[in-house]
Image (cartoon, rainbow, N blue to C red):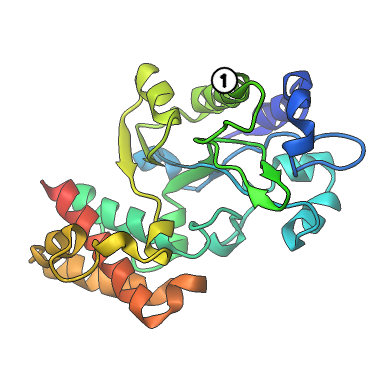
Amino acid sequence: MDIRKLVENFTNWNLEEIEIYRELISTRDDKAIFPPYIPFVGKSYEQFGILIYAKAQNIALGDRYYEYLKNMTTEQRVRRLYDATTYPDVAIAPYNSGVIPALIGIYLYAKHHIRLESFDEIQNCLAVANYYKFSLNKNGRDINPDSLGRLSNPMQYRELNSKLCKHELNFLRPRTIVTFKGWHNKFLRDNGYKIVEISDPSFILQGGWGHFRKGGSYYKAADSVKDRTAMELAAAYSEKCEGNYKVKNKIDSVRIYLLKYYQDWQA
């Protein structure tokens, strides 16, 4: 897949429309707002056409990743996801923790009866990006793109990101988009894309609101799964996840989360 044209278009994208949000955008320096970035695209992406859309990289001015971005060239910023070689290099949480690659591993088994063991093998089969290409932060607090009351014109911000996404979607031509719940899904459906909507796994870290406890909705769905391979994959994947998902009780919640979606996709 020749991405040079997409790199060129995103590098030269006119960002005048987003200047009104400058003070809230943390992906910038004293000279300019950093350009939008193109997706990571796995070597075997075209086999299944699965695109993952997370929401936003909530980068704060001065944090470690911001300092990393600040020292990049413009082209390196545009290619920062695309140039990833392993899944931890894709700077999207909870993707680089392994939870989203694990979920796609479960999807591939549920829908295509393909068993892949490693997250890097799974990454070869997908593309991944954030729907929102600019990180919003105020007084050190992330701004959720679905709660844009602090912006003077929230629809303009959404429409700008939708233009960028439409451009990359025309390039990628995904057959399936796996994405978190949110406003952006209306845009995707209205443009004729097949959506597989999932809950952001970060709610596992927030305690799961009872869904993972015995009797909870995710627990009951996972408990009804009898397919041995699905159970083995979910257990193995959950043990491989990193970061805050590595804590013992979170490992089991990840396993339940994966099996809940296996059950949904089998149904």
Query: How many dots with numbers?
Result: 1
Residue visible at 37% across and 82% down in the picture: 248
Residue visible at 32% across and 62% down in the picture: 208
Residue visible at 73% across and 38% down in the picture: 24
In which quadrant of the rendered view does residue 19 lie? Answer: top right
Q: Is residue 115 visible?
A: no
Side of 89 relative to 93 (left or right): right
Give the answer, above or below, for where 152 lies relative to 148: above
Considering the image in quadrants, where does the N terminus appear?
Answer: top right
- How many C-alpha atoms fall within 10 Å of the one at disc 1: few (<14), some, or many (≥20)? few
Side of 123 relative to 65 (left or right): left
Considering every residue shown, the one lying at the far bottom of the view is 248
The residue identified by callout 1 is: 155
User: Label 1 sits on what residue type?
Assistant: Met
Q: Is residue 30 visible?
A: yes
In which quadrant of the rendered view does residue 73 lie? Answer: top right
Residue visible at 71% across and 53% down in the picture: 140
- Report the front residue among 85 and 250: 250
- Report the front residue among 45 and 202: 202
Give the answer, above or below, for where 105 lies relative to 243: above
Q: Position of residue 252 (x, y in %)?
A: 29, 74
Q: Position of residue 165 (x, y in %)?
A: 55, 27
Mark 1: which secondary structure? helix
- Report the front residue among 212 and 67: 212
Q: Position of residue 242 (x, y in %)?
A: 49, 72
In which quadrant of the rendered view does residue 29 lie? Answer: top right
Side of 184 relative to 178 (left or right): right
Q: Position of residue 13 (x, y in %)?
A: 74, 23
Considering every residue shown, the one lying at the far right of the view is 31
Give the answer, above or below, for where 52 lies relative to 185: below
